[in-house]
Amino acid sequence: LLLFQMAAFETTEEIELDVEERFQKCLDSLKKNLQTIRTGRANPAILDLVQVSYYGAPTPLNQMASISVPNSQQLQIDPFDKSVTNDIEKAIIESGLGLTP
């Protein structure tokens, strides 16, 4: 259900720009969600939505560590700060992705 509010002073160009902006946001969200689909081959993008508690602040995993694919079934996570390894493991388990650290 989408609700649109139109003010009497909006021009058609303003409405068109607003619709284009909202549509682009929808496409970006869809693209992000499609990247997390499991295909049978390891893909680092599946971890893009994982947030790790880093000194009390939720931080995306891909900003705290390098993520690589050593073979088709494994992801290798190399944290920049080794002291957060346990926090990363906890975040992956709690993410509900079904991955085993």
Image: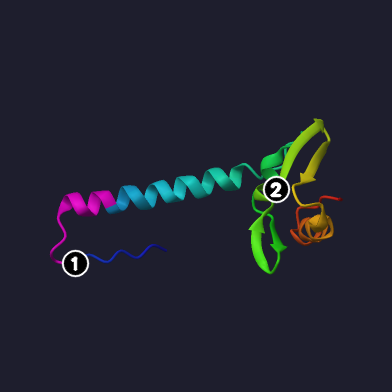
Residue 47 disc label = 2
Q: From where the camera sits, is residue 75 visible? A: yes
Figure check: 19 above or below 73: below
Q: Which residues are magenta?
A: 8-17
The Cα atoms of the two marked residues, 2 and 1, are separated by: 41 Å
Which quadrant holds the N terminus? bottom left
Where is residue 20? Give x, y as percent. Answer: 32, 47
Residue most extreme to the top: 71
Q: Judge the density around disc 2: few (<14), some (14-19), many (≥20) Cα neighbours within 10 Å.
A: some
Q: What is the three-letter code of the residue carrying label 1?
A: Ala
Question: Residue at left 73%, top 40%?
Answer: 67
User: Which residue does the image show at 38% across and 62% down from the upper left?
Assistant: 2
Q: Nearer the viewer, mark 2 or mark 1?
A: 2
Most common SS among magenta residues: helix
Q: Is residue 40 visible?
A: no
Residue at 76% from the left image edge and 58% from the top image edge: 96
Residue under the point 66% across and 42% down? 45
Residue 7's disc is 1
